[in-house]
Every structure is written in structure tokens, then in C-alpha cells.
């Protein structure tokens, strides 16, 4: 099976603090991998480092997507290459409508991938079809990005962006936090609808609950900046029962 | 060659409170030859007459109006009556390498509705020091859209004196992206109950541009409402100035007057100076002001890039979001398009 994302010896600091400490992880194409772990283990940092957020300094290691080291790319180039990070806390952007934001993003990625950009009318048709799946209304698309949205609405909008940009590898950073069970199902359905042999997911979560709806192929425990344990879906159930304390040593 | 009279007042400097942030003494010694302005306007709008102006204007006595009065330039009287659907387009032609001081008197009869689109374009290496007087009779509604996109070598100064009558409304939207030095100084008086004023000023400046909006909002009668929305986006070494004075007369009860100033600095060398001045002599009023100065939200910039939008485009999107509220007031599609295009030209220049 081909490896889609291959992370080797990834070491990174935030400001001066060491967060990732030689993390290695290989994600084959078509699989869903869950990453669990205690607070402060570096789970969110892994997402940010892979996506290229400012302030995170990579001091060693590689992260290859389809054989290309994405760590050398600009943030937006990684997106064009097929990486998508759904944020735990989506950002509010006053004055910029969701529709404008989504179309700008979609066309920027199309352009970078050498594909034709989409005019306003066909884009509207496309976005409506995808929004309908997530129960997102036209009114939500007209509003400024995330301003006045509930936690659940914000996460649904993240999933809309995921559906729109059709990445090779999607990282969901605690997408389940703050969601009620109905919203959780909507998010899980969106992810499941995108599962494909050439696409993979990293699902970062604290709770087993999300994994009832998005069935992982593998579960990893991230602690102290590296993967300390890997297993099948049963590992998530075990962690739910025992916690992380026994891993501390 | 010098055509100014010897008693012409000197250019004001920062010792004067009203010019605290805008030093015009640097204009001394670079006097340009005085020239006569001409006015281009949209032809034959039913209900609108334009004629050469004989009577003197009633302007506040300020260093700028004193200087303008000392110069001989042309003037026009514009009178409007009725509900006029098409915008009246005005463009003062101000010659290159010349100094001008044109005067306009605009009168809207009772219940007249008019939109003025002012192309406030000054030629290269010119200096204009304009005086506008606007009178709105009872129930009149004027929407005044003003686009100033002069060359950086131009100096654009304008003082306006606006009286807003009973239940009349004055809506001003001024977009300022041009001139090396620009100062817009509207003196607006709400003279009768029910008068309403909406002032929106957007400065988008870069390099060494200096843009000053100094307003005086005088509530002289009860039940008047005024809102001022000022947005500055400053790149390079640009400097934005907003001095907003609100004066509420003793009998102007039930006045509601608001001011909001926000500045977005795109460079560490850009500077914003804000000075609100509230003089309130009535006790039953609602007056407020707020001012913020900030930089591009790094998290928002990251979020846009993390959705595939390149840095320059992401910055442009954030700037457009910053001024979106200010542009909302323009409902005429063709005017809105011109505003958007002028904003786009600024964005091309700075990002």
C-alpha cells in the first residue's frame, strides 16, 4: 500500500519550547488514523506544523506528501498540494462574506493546481450542493466568516471547506469539541462521504465518541511530542477506560 | 508671477490646535501660479441648474478659508429641486502646476432628493484649496459620494459648510486614496429638529501620503442624529488624521451623535492620529465615540492561507473586510463599482 503522508523524525519548537520530539508516522492512502493523547502532548502542534503556521520552528525531520517535503512549502502551497487542516477554533473575519471567502479559496487552489477558475454562477451552484449536505443555508453563506456563528455552525463550515477543497490528506483538530450529538453526526457524515482510496484522514480527538462515527483504521497515542503507542480501533476504547496516566512513565 | 495678495494669511502649522497633526507650513515657498478652475458636470439633469456664482459664501473662518478667500477663482451655484434619480456628476478641473481655490454653493430645495458624485481629482503638482457650501432645506436628502484619487504630487484641501434643515438628511461618503497631502474639513450644522447626518470617510494611504479628515458636527437643534464612521488603512510611511468635533448646543436635547474611528496599519512606519472632541451643553443626549488602531490579524491571515489563498490576496481580502462596513452605504451600483475599483487600485499598490 502506498504511503500518502510520511512523517519522519519531526522535531519542532513553539517559540523556545520543544513540542514535537522526533515524531514519526506513516499514513497509507485511503486510511483514517486517529491521534489521541493527553493535553499538551503536541497534538494541535502537529497539525499546525504540518500546515505551516507562523511561530512553529521545525528543527529536524521531514513530512512528505506524495513524496514531496511539504515543510519547505508556503502555507497555501501545502493546501494546493493536498493538505487540509480543520481548525479547532475557526477564525472570525468581519466584513468578508463566507461566499466570497470560499470562492476566493476555491479558485486560488484551482489556479495553483493548474485548473480553470470558476465564475460566480457555477460556483454558487457547486457550493449550494455541498452546503445542502451539511444543512448550511444561503443565509449562513452570506454572513461574514464565522462572525456570530455557534460552535457547531463553525465546525460545519470547516467541513464545507473540506468538501470544497477535496484534499489528499485532511487533519481534523478536535473537530468534535463543543459539538452535540447531532452536529457530530453531520461532521462524521461529511468525512465519511469523502473517504476514498486516494485520500486519508488524521483525526485528532480527546474522546472515543467521534470514533464511533468515523471508524479509524489505526489509533495512535501522542505523548511528550512523539507517538508512544499504536494499535487498532480497540486502543481508543482502552484509552477511554484507562486514561493516559499509565503512559506517563 | 505671484498673484496672491500680500495680505494672504500664512499656511497654518502645528501650533494651531486644528492643525496639530497636519503641518501645512511646508507648503510655503512653493507657491504655484494661481489659475481659474472650470467645472464639468453631467449635462442637463432635469431639476438641476448650474450657474456662475456671484454671491459670497458663508464659510467658517479658518486658516484655509481665509487663504481661499484671498484668491480669485471661479465659483458656481447649483440649485436642485424635485426627486432627481440620476446622480449629478461634478468634476472641478484643476490645472497642472497651478494653485486654485474654486467655490461651490449647492442648494437643495425642500423635499429634494439628489445624489452627487464628486470626482475630486487634482492634477499632478497642483494645489487646490476649495470651499463648498451646501444648504439642505426641509426634508431634502443629499447623498454625496466623493472620490479623491489625485496624484501624489498634488495637495488637496477642501472645507465645506453644510446646513441640514428640518428632517433633512446629508449622507457623505468620501474615499481618499490620493494626493501627497489631503485635508477634508466638513463643518456640518444640524439647524432644525429631525436633521440626520451620516458621514463616512475612508483613507487608504501609502508611501508618504498624509490624509486628514477634520470634522465639526454642530447639533444646533433638538432631535438631531449624526453618525461618523472613519476608516484608515495605512501602508508605507503614510499618516492618517481624524479630528472629530461634536458640539451639542444647550437646547439640542435628544441629540444622538456617534463617532467610530478604526485604523489598520499595514506597516510599522505608518501612523494614525485620532482626536475626538465632544462639547456637550445639553443634558438629555446620547453621544459616544470609539477609536481603535490595529494591525493585520495574524491568525486571520493564517486561516486564509490555510485555505489556499496566497499572502497578498489574503491581505487584500482582510483589508476589504476592514472597510466593508464603510462602503455599505453606497447603493447606486455604478458608484459602488467606481469605489470598488478605486479600492482595488490602492490594493494593487500596497500588497
Image: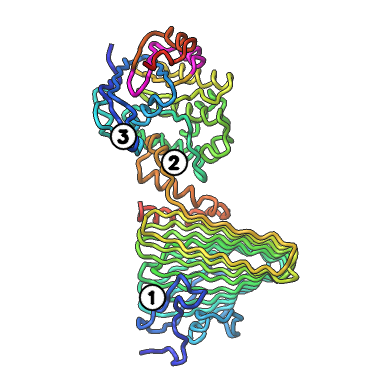
Front position in the image: A57 or B163: A57
- For label 2, the SS is helix
In the image, residue B258 above or below residue A34? below
Residue B140 visible somewhere in the drawing: yes
Q: Position of residue A215 (x, y in %)?
A: 45, 12
Q: Which mark is residue A77?
A: 3
Quadrant where the N terminus of chain B sits is: bottom left
Q: Quadrant of residue A16?
A: top left
Give the Cα distance between marks 1 and 3: 46 Å
Provide the residue designation for mark 2.
Answer: B300
Which residue is drawn at the image coordinates 62% and 66% (left, top)?
A: B278
Residue extending farthest bottom: B6
Residue under numbered circle 1: B126
Region in magenta = A207-227
Tell which of B341 and A248 is nearer to you.
A248
Give me the C-alpha separation between circle 2 and circle 3.
17 Å
Of marks 1 and 3, the one in the foreground = 3
Amino acid at each position: 500500500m502506498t504511503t500518502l503522508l510520511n512523517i519522519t523524525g519531526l522535531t519542532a519548537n513553539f517559540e523556545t519550547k520543544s513540542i514535537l520530539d522526533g515524531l514519526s508516522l506513516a499514513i497509507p492512502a485511503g486510511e483514517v488514523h486517529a491521534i489521541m493523547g493527553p493535553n499538551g502532548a503536541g497534538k494541535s502542534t502537529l497539525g499546525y506544523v504540518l500546515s505551516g503556521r507562523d511561530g512553529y520552528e521545525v528543527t529536524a525531520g521531514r513530512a512528505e506528501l506524495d513524496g514531496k517535503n511539504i515543510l519547505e512549502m508556503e502555507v497555501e502551497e501545502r493546501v494546493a498540494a493536498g493538505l487540509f487542516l480543520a481548525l479547532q477554533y475557526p477564525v472570525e473575519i468581519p466584513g468578508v462574506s463566507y461566499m466570497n471567502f470560499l470562492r476566493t479559496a476555491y479558485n486560488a487552489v484551482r489556479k495553483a493546481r493548474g485548473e480553470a477558475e470558476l465564475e460566480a454562477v457555477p460556483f454558487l451552484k457547486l457550493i449550494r450542493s455541498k452546503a445542502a449536505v451539511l444543512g448550511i443555508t444561503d443565509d449562513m453563506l452570506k454572513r461574514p466568516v464565522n462572525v456570530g456563528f455557534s460552535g457547531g455552525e463553525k465546525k460545519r463550515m470547516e467541513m464545507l471547506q473540506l468538501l470544497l477543497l477535496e484534499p489528499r490528506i485532511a487533519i481534523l483538530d478536535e473537530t468534535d469539541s463543543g459539538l452535540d450529538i447531532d452536529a457530530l453526526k453531520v461532521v462524521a457524515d461529511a468525512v465519511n462521504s469523502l473517504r476514498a482510496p486516494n485520500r486519508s484522514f488524521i483525526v485528532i480527538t480527546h474522546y472515543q465518541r467521534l470514533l464511533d462515527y468515523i471508524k479509524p483504521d489505526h489509533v495512535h497515542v501522542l505523548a511528550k511530542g512523539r507517538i508512544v503507542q499504536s494499535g487498532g480501533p480497540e486502543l481508543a476504547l482502552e484509552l477511554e477506560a484507562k486514561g493516559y496516566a499509565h503512559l506517563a512513565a | 508671477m505671484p498673484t496672491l495678495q500680500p495680505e494672504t494669511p500664512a499656511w497654518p502649522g502645528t501650533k494651531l490646535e486644528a492643525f496639530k497633526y497636519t503641518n501645512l507650513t511646508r507648503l510655503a515657498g512653493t507657491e504655484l501660479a494661481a489659475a481659474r478652475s472650470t467645472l464639468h458636470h453631467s449635462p442637463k439633469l432635469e431639476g438641476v441648474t448650474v450657474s456662475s456664482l456671484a454671491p459670497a459664501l458663508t464659510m467658517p473662518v479658518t486658516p484655509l478659508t481665509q487663504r481661499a478667500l484671498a484668491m480669485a477663482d471661479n465659483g458656481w451655484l447649483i440649485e436642485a429641486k424635485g426627486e432627481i434619480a440620476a446622480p449629478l456628476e461634478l468634476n472641478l478641473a484643476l490645472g497642472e502646476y497651478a494653485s486654485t481655490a474654486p467655490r461651490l454653493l449647492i442648494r437643495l430645495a425642500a423635499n429634494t432628493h439628489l445624489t452627487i458624485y464628486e470626482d475630486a481629482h487634482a492634477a499632478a503638482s497642483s494645489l487646490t484649496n476649495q470651499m463648498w457650501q451646501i444648504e439642505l432645506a426641509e426634508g431634502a436628502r443629499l447623498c454625496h459620494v466623493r472620490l479623491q484619487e489625485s496624484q501624489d504630487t498634488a495637495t488637496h484641501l477642501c472645507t465645506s459648510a453644510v446646513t441640514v434643515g428640518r428632517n433633512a438628511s446629508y449622507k457623505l461618503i468620501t474615499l481618499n486614496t490620493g494626493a501627497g497631502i489631503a485635508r477634508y474639513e466638513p463643518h456640518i450644522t444640524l439647524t432644525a429638529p429631525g436633521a440626520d447626518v451620516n458621514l463616512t470617510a475612508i483613507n487608504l494611504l501609502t508611501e508618504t501620503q498624509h490624509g486628514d479628515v477634520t470634522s465639526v458636527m454642530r447639533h444646533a437643534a433638538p432631535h438631531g442624529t449624526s453618525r461618523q464612521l472613519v476608516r484608515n488603512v495605512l501602508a508605507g510611511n503614510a499618516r492618517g488624521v481624524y479630528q472629530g468635533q461634536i458640539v451639542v448646543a444647550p437646547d439640542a436635547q435628544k441629540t444622538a451623535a456617534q463617532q467610530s474611528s478604526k485604523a489598520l496599519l499595514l506597516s510599522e512606519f505608518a501612523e494614525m492620529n485620532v482626536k475626538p472632541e465632544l462639547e456637550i451643553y445639553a443634558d438629555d443626549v446620547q453621544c459616544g465615540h470609539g477609536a481603535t488602531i490595529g494591525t493585520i490579524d495574524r491568525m486571520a491571515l493564517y486561516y486564509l492561507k490555510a485555505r489556499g489563498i496566497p499572502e497578498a490576496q489574503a491581505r487584500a481580502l482582510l483589508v476589504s473586510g476592514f472597510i466593508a462596513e464603510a462602503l455599505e452605504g453606497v447603493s447606486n451600483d455604478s458608484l459602488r463599482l467606481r469605489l470598488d475599483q478605486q479600492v482595488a487600485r490602492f490594493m494593487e499598490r500596497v500588497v
